[in-house]
Image (tube, helix red, strand yellow):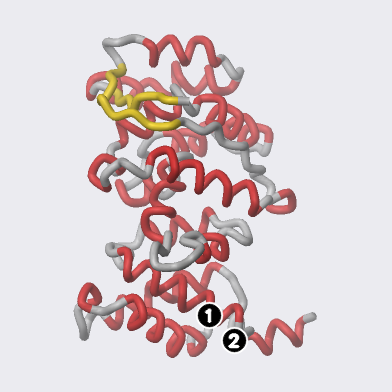
Amino acid sequence: MNSCIKYMTDKFLESFRAEFFVKIGPLYQVGDKENILQLFEDSNNVKEAGITYEYEPLEVESVSNSEYSADIVRQNIRKVWNSLGGLSPTQAEMEKIWVALLHTDYIDYHLSSCKLLLEAGKSLENLAARTYFTNGAKRSLAINNLALMWWLAYYFRDDQASNPYHLLDFFVETPYRGNAVGLLSSNIVSKKSIALGILAGIQYLVCNNIIGVNRYAFTESNRILNEVGGVVILDFLSQDDIKEIIIKNLPKSGKVKLGNEIQSSL
């Protein structure tokens, strides 16, 4: 379905943020789609950017780790990129675009996701973070329900591979949101070659049973590269350079679980 990118006016975004817990949040709690849509159908509040795209509906992901489906996440990321990959990075940093999209074309996905969060006992603060920017800009982009998938595809699609999503498919094999926030909100991940090198290095180590997957694999990779960045300029290194740094140094970290430790615990 052809649609048009929309964005909130600065005035409406400001009032939306200021009134979320008093006026907007309660509409989420009762699933009042009609009144939410009325706010975003007002031409004084939301404008069209003049950029068309092919909208594809997303499937709602479970918020329970025990019911996690990597296939749903993989398909959603592909759909978001196929639809919205034409946005520039500058446009994709704009809060006013993501909040508008979540409350227009993607409202069914967003409200259903928020309903699952509420049913899981999450607070309105959690919903707010998934909806608009409540943290720093980079961290907020990594938490927002829609922006997160765009930025994962932007940084971790490997356009040189026969399957551009092979690294992303590995990354989302297990529940990924915490790791995504750690990676995308880090200043280390500022260039695609660095992002791809990190993930390629971790994938190599995991697939060769040298380390296991846990959140420390990603946080320690950031720490290692931060130390390396004190000696060399990371932006001058290639994807393969970054990959080799991760392969060489990550298993030495005391926080990651090594492959022999995984086997002995089985």
Name the residue nearer the viewer: 105 or 14. 105
Q: Are marks 1 and 2 in contact (CB under 8 Å)?
A: yes
Question: Of the numbered discs in the image, which one, if any, rests on residue 16?
Answer: none
Q: Looking at the image, is mark 1 or mark 2 nearer the viewer?
A: 1
* Residue identified by numbered label 2: 210
The image shows residue 240 at horizontal and vertical percentages of 36, 81
Q: Is residue 197 above or below residue 252?
A: above
Name the residue nearer the viewer: 104 or 10. 104
Cα–Cα span, label 1 and label 2: 8 Å
Q: Is residue 198 left or right of residue 193?
A: right
Crowding around mark 2 (Cα neighbors within 10 Å: few <14, some 14 to 19, many 20+) is some
Q: Is residue 33 above or below residue 153?
A: above
Question: Of the numbered discs in the image, which one, if any, rests on residue 204?
Answer: 1
Kind of residue at badge 1: Tyr
Name the residue nearer the viewer: 96 or 140. 96
Kind of residue at badge 2: Ile
Residue drawn at 47 percent across, 70 percent down: 218
Q: Is residue 31 above or below residue 120?
A: above
The image shows residue 59 at horizontal and vertical percentages of 61, 37
The image shows residue 66 at horizontal and vertical percentages of 74, 53
- Mark 1 lies on a secondary structure that is helix
Who comes first in sequence, dot 1 or dot 2?
1
